[in-house]
Each structure stands twice: as C-alpha cells, then as structure tokens.
Image (tube, rainbow, N blue to C red):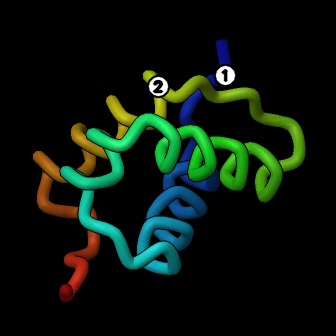
Amino acid sequence: MAEWTTESREELKKLYVQTNVTSDELIKDKEMLSEFTKALNSNLLCSHFTDEQVAGEILRIRKTGKLPRIRT
C-alpha cells in the first residue's frame, strides 16, 4: 500500500484542479475516479494508490479545508 507524502498530496491537488470536477462527482463516478487514480499514479511514477485510497485522501483533504474549490 502506497503512503501519502507531501509530494503525492500536492500532486493530487494539482491534478484535481486540472480535472475541474467536484470531489463529490469524482468520488461517485467509479470510472472517472479510476482514470484520476491512474493519472495520479502515472504522474508520481512510483506510487500505486488504489481508487479507495485516492477517494479517502480527497475527502480527508477536503475536510481540512485544503482542497482547492472547483468552480462549475
């Protein structure tokens, strides 16, 4: 199981902003979440996060108020 680092969290937030999809939408759409996870793992080169780990981390970051807002 991959561990979250400052670098991986920053990459997650960066990719999240680029996708321009709200966290609720992303987590509810399994296919979209899977594509997001694949892109994140690819960007990080050596991490192997699961969809569940990514969804959980998005929610955790959102609860702390550090997840950027998506304007729809």
Residues tagged 2 and 1 counted as in contact (Cβ below 8 A): yes
Left or right of 56: which side holds 2?
right
* Depth check, front residue: 2 or 71: 71
Q: Where does the C terminus fall, quadrant-wise?
A: bottom left
Task: Tell me the kind of residue under disc 2.
Answer: Gln
Which residue is tagged 1? 2
Q: Quadrant of residue 56?
A: top left
| Residue displayed at 47% across by 25% down | 53
- Callout 2: 10 Å neighbours few (<14), some, many (20+)? some
Q: Where does the N terminus fall, quadrant-wise?
A: top right
Residue 61 got which mark?
none
Left or right of 54: which side holds 5?
right
Q: Quadrant of residue 29?
A: top left
Instruction: Give percent across and percent down for residue 49.
Output: 63, 28
Instruction: Give percent across and percent down for residue 31.
Output: 52, 41
Task: Tell me the kind of residue under disc 1.
Answer: Ala
Asked which secondary structure carries label 2, the reply is helix
Residue 53 got which mark?
2
Reply above or below: 59 against 24. Answer: above
| N-term-proximal mark, 2 vs 1 | 1
